[in-house]
Amino acid sequence: MELDNKRLVARTLEIAESLASLEGLSPPDVTVVVVDNIYKPRLRLMDGLDVDLVGNTILIEKSTPDNILYRVLVGVFFLSYWHTFKASNPAMAQELARKHFFKALVALFKDHP
């Protein structure tokens, strides 16, 4: 059974917040929104991923499940780093997302072959 995008993003967010806590970061309350470049007040972290620091919002373009997973991980790690240290570190967010990508992928799909 394939995960629909809404459940995919919700489950990915849970996993990403748990991983951020394991890294010693304090994840904020995050809202994930899948969009097609319609929301304006944002910071572009990478292609297909923007964040709104004020609203703790992650904005991702529609994509394949693996890209959605990676973008949500980067967004959560970025906002968690910001929330913890009040500093912007996109490189660290991407490094942590790469570090935890396969662990998150397995957790995401273990009950959904």
Image (cartoon, rainbow, N blue to C red):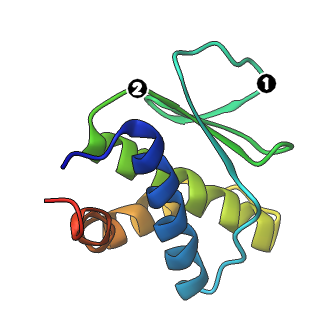
Q: Residue furthest left?
A: 113
Mark 1 and mark 2: Cα distance apart in space: 19 Å
Residue 105 vs residue 71, the one in the foreground: 105
Q: Residue at x 76, y 48 (%)?
A: 56
Left or right of 104 on screen, residue 12: right
Residue 40 vs residue 95, the one in the foreground: 40
What amino acid is labelled 1 in the image?
Pro
Q: Is residue 89 visible?
A: no
Quarter of the image for residue 99 reads: bottom left
Classify 10 Å Cα crowding around label 1: few (below 14), some (14-19), many (20 and above). Answer: few
x and y percentages locating residue 62 in the rendered image? 40, 26
x and y percentages locating residue 25 in the rendered image? 66, 79
Q: Which residue is mark 2?
A: 62
Of the image marks 1 and 2, the number of the one nearer the N terminus: 1
What amino acid is labelled 2 in the image?
Lys
Left or right of 75 on screen, residue 70: left
Cβ–Cβ under 8 Å for marks 1 and 2: no
Q: Residue at x 70, y 55 (%)?
A: 88
Secondary structure under badge 2?
Answer: loop
x and y percentages locating residue 86 in the rendered image? 82, 64
Q: Residue furthest right?
A: 54
Circle count: 2
Classify 10 Å Cα crowding around label 2: few (below 14), some (14-19), many (20 and above). Answer: some
Q: Residue at x 54, y 77 (%)?
A: 18
Q: Residue at x 35, y 39 (%)?
A: 4
Q: Which mark is on residue 41?
A: 1
Q: Is residue 42 visible?
A: yes
